[in-house]
C-alpha cells in the first residue's frame, strides 16, 4: 500500500504541474504510467491470440501512449481518478481500432485461415478480465459494449479490466466502499454477458 500511496502522490504532483502549464510534466506523467500500460497490453494480447498473431504488446502500447499524449493536449485531468479514466478510454479506442483493422473485410485476420479457432459452443464471457475468446468480432463487440456502459459502471470496468486494479484499490480511489464497487462491477458483467449473448443469437446484434 505504501508504494501505491507514493505513486498516487507523484501522480497528484504531476497533475498539478500540468495544470500550471508545465508541458514536461505531461511527458513525465505518461512515462510514469508506461509500465502499467505495457503490462496491460501484454496481458490482453495473451487473452486474444488471434490479435497477438498480427501485433505485439509494444504496438498496442505505442498506439495507446500516442492517443493519451494527444488527449492530454486538450484535456487536463483534475485528479488521479480522472487520469486513469482518460487512459482507459485511450486503451479501449486503440483496441477497437486494432480489432476493426484486422476484422474488416480487407483485414489480414478476416482473410487468413486461423488454426484451432475452437467451437462456438464453448464461448462464454466469465468476466471482462478473462473473456476466454479469441474471436475478433466478439472482441470488438466487447469493447464497444464497455463504452456503452453507464458512467459509474464503465469507470469500474476501466480500472479493473484495463488497469488491473483490485476492487479494494478502486474503492479507495473513488471513495466508496468495496461493496459498492462490487455491485457496479457485477452489474456491468451482467450487461456485457447479455449484450454479447444477444449478438450471438440468430439475427442478433448489428
Image (tube, rainbow, N blue to C red):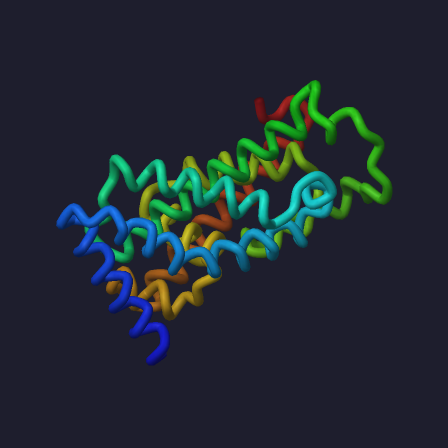
Q: Is residue 141 visible?
A: yes
Residue in the image at 50% along x and 38% along y? 94
Give the residue at the far left of this rendering: 20
Q: Quadrant of residue 137?
A: top right
Residue in the image at 76% along x and 47% along y? 122
Q: Quadrant of residue 7?
A: bottom left
Taking the image as shown, residue 16 lies to the left or right of residue 8, namely: left
Give the residue at the far bottom of this rendering: 2
Q: Is residue 8 above or below residue 206?
A: below
Q: Position of residue 180 (x, y in %)?
A: 33, 62
Q: Nearer the viewer, residue 63 or 47?
A: 63
Q: Is residue 9 above or below residue 109?
A: below
Q: Is residue 126 visible?
A: no
Q: Position of residue 142 (x, y in %)?
A: 55, 39
Q: Is residue 124 above or below residue 167?
A: above
Q: Is residue 71 above or below residue 172?
A: above
- The number of discs equals 0
Taking the image as shown, residue 143 lies to the left or right of residue 173, namely: right
Q: Quadrant of the N terminus?
A: bottom left
Taking the image as shown, residue 141 lies to the left or right of residue 79, namely: right
Q: Quadrant of the C terminus?
A: top right
Give the residue at the far top of this rendering: 105
Q: Position of residue 90 (x, y in %)?
A: 42, 41
Q: Nearer the viewer, residue 29 or 94?
A: 29
Q: Position of residue 131 (x, y in %)?
A: 62, 50
Q: Quadrant of residue 31?
A: bottom left
Residue in the image at 65% along x and 23% along y? 104
Amino acid at each position: 500500500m505504501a508504494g501505491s500511496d507514493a505513486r498516487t502522490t507523484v501522480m497528484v504532483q504531476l497533475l498539478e504541474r500540468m495544470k500550471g502549464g508545465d508541458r514536461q510534466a505531461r511527458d513525465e506523467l505518461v512515462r510514469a504510467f508506461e509500465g502499467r500500460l505495457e503490462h496491460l497490453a501484454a496481458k490482453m494480447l495473451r487473452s486474444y491470440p488471434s490479435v497477438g498473431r498480427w501485433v505485439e504488446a509494444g504496438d498496442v502500447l505505442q498506439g495507446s501512449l500516442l492517443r493519451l499524449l494527444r488527449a492530454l493536449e486538450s484535456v487536463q485531468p483534475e485528479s488521479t481518478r480522472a487520469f486513469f479514466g482518460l487512459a482507459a478510454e485511450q486503451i479501449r479506442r486503440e483496441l477497437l481500432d486494432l480489432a476493426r483493422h484486422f476484422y474488416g473485410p480487407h483485414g489480414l485476420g478476416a482473410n487468413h485461415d486461423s488454426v484451432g479457432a475452437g467451437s462456438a459452443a464453448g464461448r462464454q464471457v466469465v468476466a471482462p478480465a478473462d473473456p476466454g475468446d479469441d474471436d475478433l468480432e466478439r472482441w470488438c463487440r466487447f469493447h464497444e459494449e464497455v463504452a456503452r456502459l453507464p458512467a459509474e459502471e464503465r469507470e469500474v470496468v476501466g480500472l479493473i479490466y484495463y488497469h488491473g486494479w483490485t476492487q479494494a484499490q478502486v474503492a479507495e480511489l473513488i471513495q466508496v466502499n468495496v461493496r459498492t464497487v462490487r455491485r457496479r462491477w457485477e452489474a456491468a458483467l451482467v450487461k456485457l454477458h447479455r449484450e454479447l449473448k444477444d449478438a450471438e443469437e440468430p439475427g442478433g446484434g448489428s
